Image (tube, helix red, strand yellow):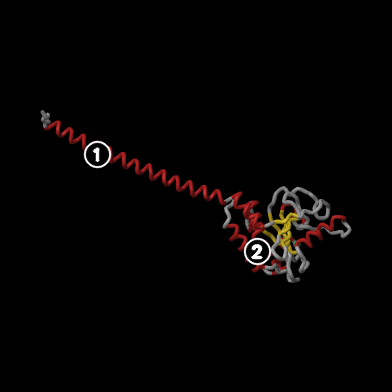
Amino acid sequence: MAKVLSKEEWKRRKRLYAYAKLAVAAVLALLIVVVLVVGVVKVAKNLFSRGDSTSSEEQTSTMKQDLNITELFLSKNQYSRPGNALVQVKGIVIHYVANAGSSAVDNRNYYESLKDGTQNAAESSHFIIGLEGELVQCIPLSEVACASGARNADTISITFCHPLIDGVPTDEAHRTLVNLVAYLCNQYGLDKTAVLRHSDLGSQVCPKYFAEQEGKWAAFLAEVDTMLAGMKKK
Ligand SMILES: [Zn+2]
């Protein structure tokens, strides 16, 4: 025989049922919050890991590959590769070869020819950019070059070739110059204020084109700045 519920018992059960419904709703709400939080964290993690994988070392090594540097290191000698340590890089100094139509390798070989001292000249550059935009490295970045006087001690030197005596770089050489300077700034934590013309250090009109045309130099620095801004600093 079915038990007849008292009025109180009936009310109590109704209350319990209401509490149970509330508890289930609360648990469901909590679950939804947890799922949302986990989802957001996962998405954020993905974003960050994606950022990591394309920046810093990977990006730097890709850039270095794009630069396609040919290492033709000079013999150690007191006239073009003295072998002194380049301890701290505080700037990048730009030069031109002042020998219209000569190639990057021609100029590298000229530096090498100074080693016996018979030409009584001391000259070199860490990098030479050729007419086709090709890039030759003459001196490791752990050593000083003979390019920028007193600033040899704390700068990297880049010298570009040019087809005519006006010293205007070819488009290809210009492009390599922007890429190389931005790459080096990124590597050494420098900005465009650390990028100098040889003429900024003294009386030489070098590199002629940029030394004589402030607007072209400012435009070049702006290009470097834009490229640098697109890189994630180390
Ligand atoms: Zn110079």
The answer to whether mark 1 and mark 2 are in CB contact below 8 A is no
At 49% from the left edge and 49% from the top edge, which residue is drawn?
Answer: 47
> Is the residue at mark 2 in contact range of ligand 1, meaning its CB lies under 8 Å from it?
no
Numbered disc 1: secondary structure? helix
- Report the quarter where the N terminus lies: top left
**Residue 219, quarter of the rendered image:** bottom right
Q: Identify the mark nearer the N-term, 1 or 2.
A: 1
Is residue 136 left or right of 34 when viewed as pictured?
right
Task: Measure the alpha-carbon separation of dots 1 and 2.
Answer: 70 Å
Q: Is residue 150 visible?
A: no
User: Residue 87: percent from the left, percent from the top?
Assistant: 72, 47
User: Residue 110: percent from the left, percent from the top?
Assistant: 81, 60
User: Residue 177: percent from the left, percent from the top?
Assistant: 67, 61
In the image shown, does 184 or 54 lie closer to the viewer? 54
**Label 2: how many residues lie within 10 Å, few (<14), some (14-19) or many (20+)?**
some
Q: Residue furthest right?
A: 118
Q: Which residue is mark 2?
A: 175
**Label 1: how many residues lie within 10 Å, few (<14), some (14-19) or many (20+)?**
few
Q: Which residue is mark 1?
A: 21
Which amino acid, mark 1?
Lys
